[in-house]
Image: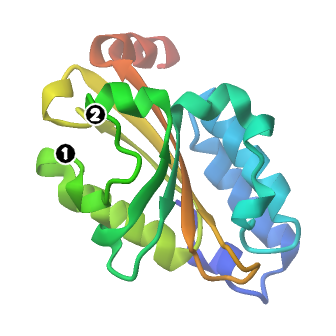
Amino acid sequence: MVSGEAAGDSGTGRQSEMSAWDSFRAQLVIPEHRLLFEYWLSRCGTRAMPCRSDIKPSEIAKLLPGISLIDIAEDISKSRVRLAGTKLREIHDREITGETIEALDWGDKRDYWLAAYHRTVEQAEPTQGVLKAPRFSKEHMVQYWLRLPLTCNGGDHTAMILGHDYFVPALQNQHRERRIA
């Protein structure tokens, strides 16, 4: 997660903002997340975040299976999944497009996800993380996630979240960590 003072403080200037983005980018270990973050950043221009209309699915076609779009509600748990890629359908074992955040099967990770979405909305900045077992029946998986704020009116209010999720078997993830270390 990027610190609030770098991107949200209008007095910091673009150079400080870019340093914060470099720090955030360095935390992205999944190439697809780096690609989506770079795309999101390119669509920001001089704004804190891009508008939903700035995001063109055809420009990120390879990422679409792991993409989600969340319409933000005042009560974050009432936020609705506007779009969920096919990989998310596989993980949730059902179509989740149209569901609210609270209706999703998060198991004991419900509070984690509510906090992650709340942080993205409130700070109006990208967030990312890694989580073992994205849901109860998927204990064998590790989920790398990225959440990027979007506005609908060109302002600085987060109205939507563009997400990308990448899943790997936990055993495969252990081998990846050993190779890196």
Residue 77 shown left or right of residue 149 in the figure: left
Q: Going 43% across and 36% down the picture, which residue do you hit?
A: 144
Residue 32 shown left or right of residue 87 in the figure: right
Residue 145, placed above or below residue 114: above
Residue 150 shown left or right of residue 165 in the figure: right
Residue contact at pointers 2 and 1, CB within 8 angstroms: yes
Helix, strand or loop under label 2: helix
Residue in front for this viewpoint, 162 or 5: 162
Q: Position of residue 43 (x, y in %)?
A: 82, 57
Q: Quadrant of residue 162?
A: bottom right
Q: Going 25% across and 57% down the picture, which residue do you hit?
A: 112
Q: Position of residue 45 (x, y in %)?
A: 88, 66
Figure disc tally: 2
Q: Quadrant of residue 88?
A: top left
Q: Position of residue 56 (x, y in %)?
A: 78, 47
Residue marked by disc 2: 92
C-alpha distance separating marks 2 and 1:
7 Å
Label 1 neighbour load within 10 Å: few <14, some 14-19, many 20+? some
Residue in front for this viewpoint, 4 or 71: 71
Q: Quadrant of residue 148?
A: bottom right
Residue marked by disc 1: 105
